[in-house]
Amino acid sequence: MVKIAGEWLNSCSGCEIAILNLGETLLTLLPELEFVHLPVLTDNKYFGQTGERDALTIPRAVVGIVSGGVRNEEHLEVLRELRAKTDVLVALGTCATAGGIPALANQTSAASMRELVYRGQPSTVPGPDPDPSRHHIPAMLETCDAVSQHVKVDLSVPGCPPHPDWIAEAIVSLLEGRAPAMPERSVCDGCPTRRLGPDSGCAGAGGTLHRLLEQPAFDPDKGLEEMRCLLEQGFMCMGPVTRRGCGGREGAPRCIAARVPCRGCYGPVNAHSLPFVDYVGALTAVGQSYADMPDKPGYLSRFNGSHTIIRKLED
Amino acid sequence: MPRTIRIAPLTRIEGHAALDIHLDEAGDVADARMTVMSLRGFEKFLMGRPVEEVPRIVTRICGICPWQHHIASTKAAEACLGVAPTPTAAQLRELCQMLASIPDKILHFYFLAAPDFVLGPGADPALRNVAGLVGAAPELARKAALMRYRTQMGLEKFAGKVIHPVAVLVGGFSKPLLEHERAELLALTRDALDFSLESVRLARETLLPPLVKRFRELGEYPSAYLGMVDPNDGSLALHDGVLRLMDQDGSHEEFHPSDYTSHLAEKVEPWTYLKFPYMRRAGRLVLDEREPVGLYRTNCLARVNVCEGISTPLAHSELEIFRREFGRPAHQTFLYHWARLIELVYCCERAIELLEDPAILGRDIRTLPIAPRAGEGVGCVEAPRGTLIYHLKCDHEGMVTHANLLAGTTHNNAGMNLSARQAARSAIKGGVYDQGLLNTVEMSLRAYDP
């Protein structure tokens, strides 16, 4: 039996549902695993079952799995305790590996967020911010961070959510004591759609960029291999600057399978690449202009806001 | 000596929270508070985004009910831009919402709540979980796990992505449903209906009755209820309709979701990051279990309370059984579990109805063209955890200038806090408590599926 401790920080529980979506594989693996701490499914408490301890404690385990980014002091405390009590720490999902969507908040200040939520909404009777100095709630950090910005991570499994195939690969490789074989390269590398080249004279090529207010061209009775590359059709597909893997070992990229462009949910192709820079080249390759692109941070930093290279906008 | 018991994290719930129980000199409960520790602030970073991208961002508010966020925000964006989905697209969206609700309800009942029913509220906490359930009732656990998995995968196969979906677009849906996909989903949904009927029977005949009795003293107080109904006949509505706010005595008013600020207000407290919605006309919120003021509840118990009936036959007859026993409105917190399974039956039946309508195979899936314009709009659906309201404004280029949202669990913040205090007062006296009693207090929150 391998002991596992799982935690979720600034997260949505999608990663945990992805674990459940291992389905039969999970049922096969379960006899080999013991979950000593996993708040969504089991009842272990930080301060003891009757709240008798003063210090936040997580039981010792071989493998730690953490989803979500780091947004407040409690996330930090939980993360450090999990790191201290586990031999191998897995960062699960793009929030943990790159900040994920909640790190879009890093483009403005935490104070401006509280200002809107507690004093700027038509349904809200304005009140002062919740007060961590007087009450038992953690103070917010100024930014939403990836897990690796605070502790050493042994294995990153990105994805929003990660495909169950890669969650299984992470667990099985650890059980077998070998290096995991995780996907590298870009979404385009595993995309079956057709590229005809920017000068093919087909509709969309070299024309204006399209927002999702328009409809890509495709024949629903034909497979994805008959659909023209959405980027070539002028839709802002983030495939070229996004790590592949969302379709699992066998499948096509998931958004493409739904006939919509990629938005980058696996994070950058590699941890140190810069989608903001690389996308200029990707658009140029299909005859589109980067200058025409609206809301660049909203598309290109959508999932990697903890690694953003631009400075915050003023409030 | 006064002291505080901190139960953290609250477990087998779908979100993140802690419970503080404050004891007085005598060891009795002076107060109990459920605190939400984190603020993610989606409203803030939606600003500046193209309004049609909002449905692709807000899914990350909840990995368990991303479809409801996806759909409600699309409706708000459509109201901003002045477009409506085609009839086929509207059917496909409702179908996806129903299909997504099935695994959600199975997950909550069997994986999160049932360990308390099957193993007992005071069972060994190391076993009181889904693994313990597998040990105690292997056939049932396996069946539930498989049904949950199959419905998730069925929806994913059709819609591309099931967790954090992408197929709902402003003006419609990204792809049509093909005949062979319809046949597969229909077979799957018929199996799900059989399983849901088995589940509701098991719950009302075996699992819930002993606990309903016990939990009457742990958690029952009069409150108002908020839920969506069909504007024509007042029947249960999850995808589209008007909102009905029912008072403690059963009297009610109805309003269009876009009028939400006239009926609902939110209060800020210094000890939790989650706001407290209440009825605006009450003018204030008072958490008193004998006579709460301004308090309303949402989620499945609220929905089965406010509706006149259910449009599908099997769910309706379950509702009649429920009402014969508990009346209307039913105020016991524990009955959320029962109401959830009535809705499970409805979601299966409604999905079958939609799939049996040939119009759902239509190829007209998107209203085009759509031009950016300045606008404002509200979108609403019923999420598993309650009424979900999106309010968006955008400028002439269709970029978001303001966003407000009221999510299901937020509506229940006041209700959950009152339930926690009531349960704690009833379970803990003279400083005597153990992990089992503390778990019964947690069960009063787990019922809300927060």
Image: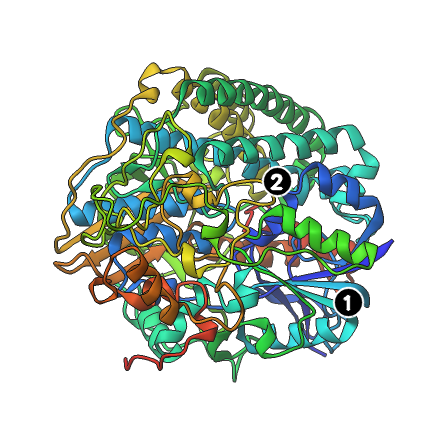
SS at badge 1:
loop
Name above or below for residue B405 compared with residue B115: below
Question: Image quadrant of residue B197?
Answer: top right
Question: Which amino acid is tagged 2?
Answer: Leu
The residue under label 1 is A48
Closer to us: B382 or A148: A148
Q: Quadrant of residue B422?
A: bottom right
**Residue B202 numbered tag:** none
Q: Residue B166, percent across and down?
A: 40, 44
Q: Indicate which label's residue lies in the foreground, 1 or 2.
A: 2
Q: Residue at x 57, y 60 (%)?
A: B16
- In the image, taking residue A169 as reference, residue A245 lies left or right, namely left
How crowded pointer 2 is (Cα within 10 Å; few <14, some 14-19, many 20+) is rated as many
Q: Return the x and y of residue B89 as percentages of the image width and height.
A: 30, 31
Q: Are marks 1 and 2 on the same chain?
A: no
Where is residue B400? Give x, y as percent.
Answer: 23, 60
Residue ID at (61%, 40%): B107
**Label 2 is found on which chain of the structure?**
B
Report which residue position mark 2 lands on. B107
- B316 in relation to A136, above or below: above
Q: Amino acid at mark 1?
A: Gly
Rendered residue at 67%/57% (across/down): A39
Q: Are marks 1 and 2 in contact (CB under 8 Å)?
A: no
Residue B298 seen in render:
no
